[in-house]
Amino acid sequence: MALTAAGILRIEDIVVPSMKRFSVLLIALALAVVMAPEAAAYPLPGQVTGDVGVHDPSMVKRPDGSYLVAHTGNDIALKTSTDRTAFRNAGSVFPGGASWTSTYTGGSRNLWAPDISYRNGQYWLYYAASTFGSNRSAIFLATSTSGNSGTWTNRGLVVESRTSDNFNAIDPDLVVDDQGRWWLSFGSFWSGIKLIALNPSTGLRSDTTMRSIAGRGGGAIEAPNIVKRGSYYYLFVSFDLCCRGASSTYRVMVGRSSSVTGPYADRNGVAMTSGGGTEILAGQGSVHGPGHQDVLADNDGDVLTYHYYANNGASLLGINLLAFDSAGWPYLH
């Protein structure tokens, strides 16, 4: 410390060094904020263990409280879990093959995007047969009283598309409305997401009407999933590109409507038939291209099941809880 000639301590000898130290601290703090890793926009997938390699998963809760997952794979792959955390392989829906699909698959046994539910004492499984990039596609129905591998009965063709059509009959999803009417949404690229009515007794198509409920002008939209919560039907879809490993850009979008047949709009009021959709999940860090979502009502709330890609390109099961904010819009936690 310096003193004046009179031996008095100067105020600047105290204040100036203190201000300098304070400035240094502010600069260091600012640098730390700038250089800190970007905060995650969405929660990471919840913990799952065991056989968790899946693509296009759909999950149902069984009467005994356990879980059954169906997903894309040869003859439609199955997995089971007793606690929604540890999963194990459980064979396939059609271990002997599904010869009736070969017209659409070019002979491949790989069947796509099943939607599984449990209603009226049996399991209902809608699934697609196609080849990548083609809209020569079909959606079929199978039923089973147990859901176990090899117990499924083919119930036939529900809807098909040809190369001359402006839609693609893949990615089926069943919803039952408040009046007990059955509907099947489906679609991928082309003119977007479609909705048809089903006969509740057979699960097959009941009329020739086909409604358009979402689209991006031919852009990348697929994997519809409709659920009713409160006063609204929520339409979840996947935007952008799947099936490219860690380069996948899939993301989960949502809109809602007071009617199951639409019109659906996003949080900003943009119609989903005009490209609207509110994002609720996208890739971040080592989670790439999350999508092909499926909502399940469980004891601890709604659960969103989906697939995502790891850095090595593996397609894995993602599970998060789903809640709704004060305005009635869904978010993950």
Image (cartoon, grey):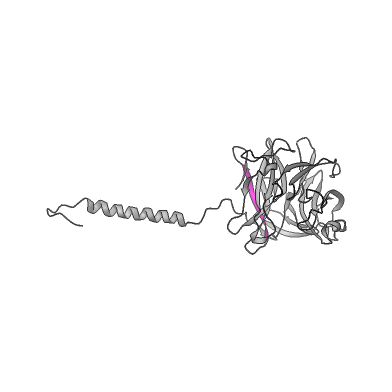
> Would you place residue 274 above or below residue 14 in this image?
above
Q: Residue at x 39, y 56 (%)?
A: 28
Q: Is residue 322 magenta?
A: yes
Residue 291 lies, in percent from the top left, at 67, 52
**Which residue is painted at 23% across and 54% down in the image?**
13
| Residue 54 quadrant | bottom right
- Of the 4 image quadrants, the one containing the N terminus is bottom left
Which of the two residues, 125 or 118, is positioned nearer the viewer here? 125
Residue extending farthest to the left is 6
Q: From where the camera sits, is residue 210 visible? A: yes
Q: Nearer the viewer, residue 255 or 68?
A: 255
312 relative to 167 in the view: left or right: left
Q: Which residues are magenta?
A: 315-325
Out of 92 and 16, give the one closest to the viewer. Answer: 16
Q: Position of residue 271 (x, y in %)?
A: 67, 40
Residue at 64%, 46% in the rendered image: 322
Query: Which picture quadrant has residue 261?
Result: top right
Q: Is residue 66 visible?
A: no
User: Where in the figure is residue 246, as x and y percent of width and height?
Assistant: 64, 61
Q: Is residue 78 above or below residue 271?
A: below
Image side of residue 271 versus residue 159, left or right:
left
Q: Nearer the viewer, residue 239 or 300?
A: 239
| Magenta portion: prevailing SS class | strand
